[in-house]
Amino acid sequence: MENVRRYRALASLCRQQAAYRPLQNWELLGQAEHFEYLAEVALKAHFDACNAQRDEDAEAPVAA
């Protein structure tokens, strides 16, 4: 989850810089979009791992 926060922070910084650098606007916005994509991928991987663990726990037999 720390990577998600980092990627979103980097995306935010890119968008802020784009506002102040009109000549690099498109490049910075493209970088921001890329960091948002990486954040989504990392978030999906995290939730997939959590769901897989929950599925494995649910399938484990209960000892009586």
Image: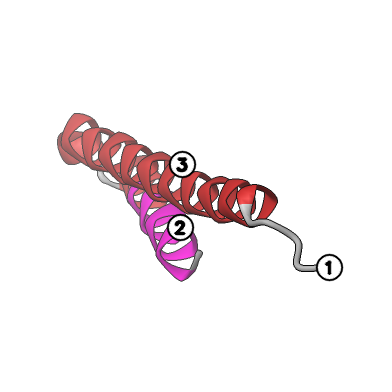
Pointer 3 or 2: first along the chain: 2
Front-most of residues 30 and 25: 30
Front-most of residues 22 and 63: 63
Residue 10 lies left or right of residue 9; in this view the side is left
What residue sits 39% from the left and 41% below the top? 36
- Neighbor class of circle 1 (other Cα within 10 Å; few <14, some 14-19, many 20+) is few
Pointer 3 or 1: first along the chain: 3
Q: Which residue is mark 3?
A: 44
Q: Amino acid type of disc 3? A: Lys
Range shown magenta: 2-14
For the stretch drawn in magenta, what is the main secondary structure?
A: helix
Q: Which residue is mark 2?
A: 4
Q: Secondary structure at mark 2?
A: helix
Pointer 2 or 1: first along the chain: 2
Q: Secondary structure at mark 3?
A: helix
- Does the magenta segment cover residue 5? yes
Q: Amino acid type of disc 1? A: Ala
Please tell me whether mark 2 or mark 1 is closer to you in this view.
1
Colour pattern: secondary structure
**Above/below status of 32 relative to 61:** above
Q: Amino acid type of disc 2? A: Val
Please tell me whether mark 3 or mark 1 is closer to you in this view.
1
Residue 18 lies left or right of residue 28; in this view the side is right
Q: Residue pushed farthest front?
A: 64
Q: Which residue is mark 1?
A: 64
Q: Quadrant of residue 24?
A: top left
Residue 49: image location, x then y, percent? 47, 52
The quarter of the picture where the C terminus appears is: bottom right
**Above/below status of 29 relative to 39:** above
